[in-house]
Image: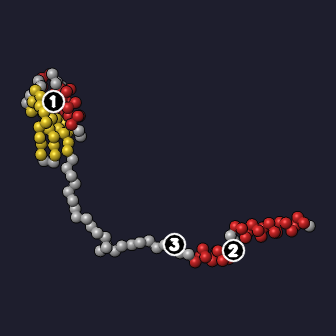
């Protein structure tokens, strides 16, 4: 008989300790989720359009027998250095690419190309 009484007391204690009850359930149900914040189109500030800064690139280009490394900033080209080469020593495909210009992202890459074609 003692065993029968222990089980119901244990269940009641467990329910009370777990916080189950009508009052807590009612509180949970009465809470509402926060409403999302919305702005009308007139409240959103638009930043004036700014021109993005020009990206500096480097181009290696062959003109006759002069192989030059250019710094390109938008429309402006500035010669950094030039070397003389003999185009007859190199494959026609390489010379054609150099005549069209080879663009690289950094100056070091441009110097590397110049070194590859230096006599």
Compute the Cα span from label 1 to label 2: 86 Å
Question: For the residue carrying disc 2, how many other residues have a C-alpha within 10 Å: few (<14), some (14-19), or many (20+)?
Answer: few
* Residue displayed at 71% across by 68% down: 17
* Residue displayed at 12% across by 28% down: 83
Q: Residue furthest left?
A: 64
Compute the Cα span from label 3 to label 2: 22 Å
User: In this image, 115 relative to 8: left or right?
Assistant: left
Place of residue 34 in the rendered image (x, y in percent of width and height, measured from the top left): 49, 72
User: In this image, 70 relative to 24: left or right?
Assistant: left
Answer yes or no: is residue 61 visible: no
Q: Which residue is mark 3?
A: 33
Helix, strand or loop for disc 3: loop
Tag 1 or tag 3, which sits nearer the N-term?
A: 3
The quarter of the picture where the C terminus appears is: top left
Q: Which residue is mark 1?
A: 95
Closer mark to the observer between disc 1 and disc 2: 2
Is 76 situated above or below 60?
Answer: below
Q: Which residue is mark 2?
A: 21
Closer mark to the observer between disc 3 and disc 1: 3
Tag 2 or tag 3, which sits nearer the N-term?
A: 2
* Residue displayed at 66% across by 77% down: 23
Is 117 situated above or below 32?
Answer: above
Place of residue 32 in the rendered image (x, y in percent of width and height, measured from the top left): 53, 75
- Residue toward you, 107 or 101: 107
Compute the Cα span from label 3 to label 1: 69 Å
Helix, strand or loop for disc 1: helix
Tag 2 or tag 1, which sits nearer the N-term?
A: 2
């Amino acid at each position: 008989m003692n065993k029968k009484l222990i089980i119901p007391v244990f269940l009641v204690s467990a329910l009370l300790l777990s916080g189950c009850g009508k009052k807590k359930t009612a509180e949970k149900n009465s809470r509402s989720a926060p409403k999302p914040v919305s702005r009308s189109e007139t409240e959103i500030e638009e930043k004036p359009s700014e021109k993005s800064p020009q990206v500096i690139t480097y181009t290696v280009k062959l003109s006759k027998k002069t192989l030059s490394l250019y710094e390109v900033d938008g429309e402006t080209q500035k010669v950094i250095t030039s070397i003389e080469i003999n185009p007859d020593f190199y494959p026609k495909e390489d010379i054609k690419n150099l005549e069209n210009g080879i663009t690289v992202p950094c100056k070091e890459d441009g110097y590397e190309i110049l070194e590859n074609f230096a006599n």
